[in-house]
Amino acid sequence: MSALGRCLILTRQIPTFMLLFKPEDCLILVVDDVRQNLQVIGEILELAGYETTFAPSGQQALSRVKTAQPDLILLDLMMPEMSGIEVCEILKKDPDFSEIPIIFLTASNEIDNLLQAFKKGANDYITKPFRSEEILVRIEAQLTNKKLKQKLEEKNQELEAEIGVRRRTEESLQQAIELANAANRAKSSFLANMSHELRTPLNAILGFTQLLTHSSNLTLEQKNNLSIIHRSGEHLLKLINDILDLSKEEEGEITVTPFILKDILVELQEVFALKLREKGLKLEILVENRVPTTIESDRLKLQQILTNLLSNAIKFTFSGGIKLRVNAILDPEKTWLSFEVTDTGIGISPEDLSKLFQPFVQTETGLVNPEGAGLGLVICRKYVRLLGGEITVSSEPNRGTTFKFQIVVKPVEPKHSDKEPDPTLHRILVADEEATNREVLTTMLSSEGFEVREAKNGQEALEIYHSFEPHLIWMDVRISLVDGCEAAQQIKATSKTSIPPIIAMTTRIVEKDKDSILLAGYDDFLVKPIQKSQVFEKIFKHLGVPDTFEKIPPSESNQLRWKNFKKLPTSMLCDLEYATLALDDDRLDRLLPEIPPECGELEQNIRDCLENFEYQIILDAIKSAKIERFAHSHLISEWMMQMTQAVHTADLSEIKELIARLQPQNSALANQLEYHLGNLDYQNILRAIADLEETQSPD
């Protein structure tokens, strides 16, 4: 069989693969001074579907390249007159043809020349005598590489074009951002001025109505009228706050501080107690055991979210009640608090659900009781997202509505203050250029026995300060002659005795102003219109003066009634402690009837505290009973108290450290606690501690 026949047989055995190109679209130039070689290669290529053209010499090859512009060249290495190496060198130097793949045809004894060919730009080589499958595979490889390179170049060009478009878009966006920032600055300036103009008269309205309400020579009708004025002023203030909070430039900022979650929940109970009583509704607050006692988050934003949701629930509920459930998802890296507000109200239609979070839009349900500006839920969603979560709603007409949201918090160790109130009265300076503002605050303070001086501008405040030597200063930030911040700095710099706390009174709502106020020399701030309870809270904080509105702790004789806690089993003490921490009224209702008769009036005493939201009194009494019970074993008692505290605050690192400390003395209990901790089963951890306490009890 001839060589050509063998080549044809081999060609038929070559499998067909999916190519990135069509052979019939590719032109191959074959250059060889032996015509038999041209014939053999030509038939192989034609059978594979390629278009072919031929040149018997190097010079003719150069001419053919210019006219035919082939996709690939098969080039004989050794030819008379002009070798393949010379042809390759000329083509690779020409930018019009340098990208054409060149495969050399060479004899096996021409290795040195082949190396030289690669230096000149050759892409591949085929050794004579030819094998058809090798020719086709090498051609396919080179044409595939060429096609991929072309696609890459096309993609690069597309990307460069896209980058150019994106660059122009970013330039346009940057210009838009600069314009938006300028608009925001103008808006912030407007809001600051508007806030001042709106809050100043409201400060007088709310302040004097509070003072007049306590007057003894008013008729019942006059008191009712004052109550209406005060409620209307508070309603107007709420609308103003909602609009300003929604619009302010720094809406993306949060202020993270540690606080006791229970305090917010108790405040909510107190705030809505009157409305609930008027409508005959009940508010249940259920806190799961795993919820930390003290957390770090934005307290004001969380309080406003819950206030808005509960306010809506009460507004649209006419029978039944509202439940607020709080749960926690504890994780070594992140802790989530989950809140769920459920009511038995009139519900929301499916058509209205999509409108709930749109600003200034009232749903059909909302028109039943059209109070507010339609911003409460908009602000709720904005604040929830700022705190790292999302809010959802589900509802059924005439059955009720449920709002759920989650926020990210950080459990922290609660800090207890040992500061005792100082009953001594103090001198206080009030500096505000608005006469009504000064009169409201002066009347509040004078009625409680404080000695008060007034200053109507910053310069007068400095003069009175040096002669009066006040213990505390209330100073408006926007004050004439000498700016409030400058006056505060001068007082701090020139004080010859102890520096008094300086509290800023401001109508500004921009979040960053709070930091600048504190940096300017103020020690604290209060946003107008001021409330009497807030004023005395600040005074108590900085001077230790007793707050008129603070609950009085039980007297010594009253403490005797808590002695009966010692008669309770340790397991019941643990259950009562946990239910109280969780504000779980249902569990407490189940536990209290189980108190033994020999404990006297302990059950009723606890119920009295629960009615007045005095949870801390119950917890303190339980703690005293446990300490006294295990005083004989100080070390183990201290460990148990530390572990209980760590569980209450969900402090994983502290719990692990305490378990490790226990391991050498009681490995079985340590392993048991590790198992419960792995499942985040805090209830069983406390139960195990209670069991340990039982074993430590004296006979």
Image (tube, rainbow, N blue to C red):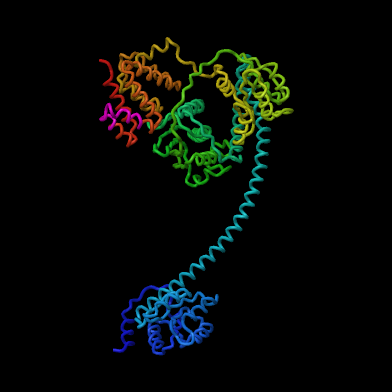
Q: Quadrant of residue 525?
A: top right
Report the residue at 46% width, 80% height from top: 73
Residues rendered magenta in the picture: 656-671
Q: In which quarter of the image is residue 240?
A: top right
Q: Quadrant of residue 462?
A: top right
Residue 366 percent across, percent down from the top left = 53, 39
| Most common secondary structure along the magenta stretch | helix
Between 262 and 606, the one lying in front of the other is: 262
Between 72 and 607, the one lying in front of the other is: 72
Vertical position of residue 186 compared to residue 67: above or below: above
Kindly give the residue lying farthest to the top in the view shown: 557
Vertical position of residue 208 compared to residue 16: above or below: above
The C terminus sits in image quarter? top left
Is residue 3 one of those drawn in magenta? no
- Residue 625 visible within the image: yes
Report the residue at 69% width, 18% height from top: 466
Between 357 and 155, the one lying in front of the other is: 155
Is residue 660 one of those drawn in magenta? yes
Residue 547 percent across, percent down from the top left = 55, 18
Classify residue 697 as left or right of residue 379: left
Report the residue at 58% width, 20% height from top: 539
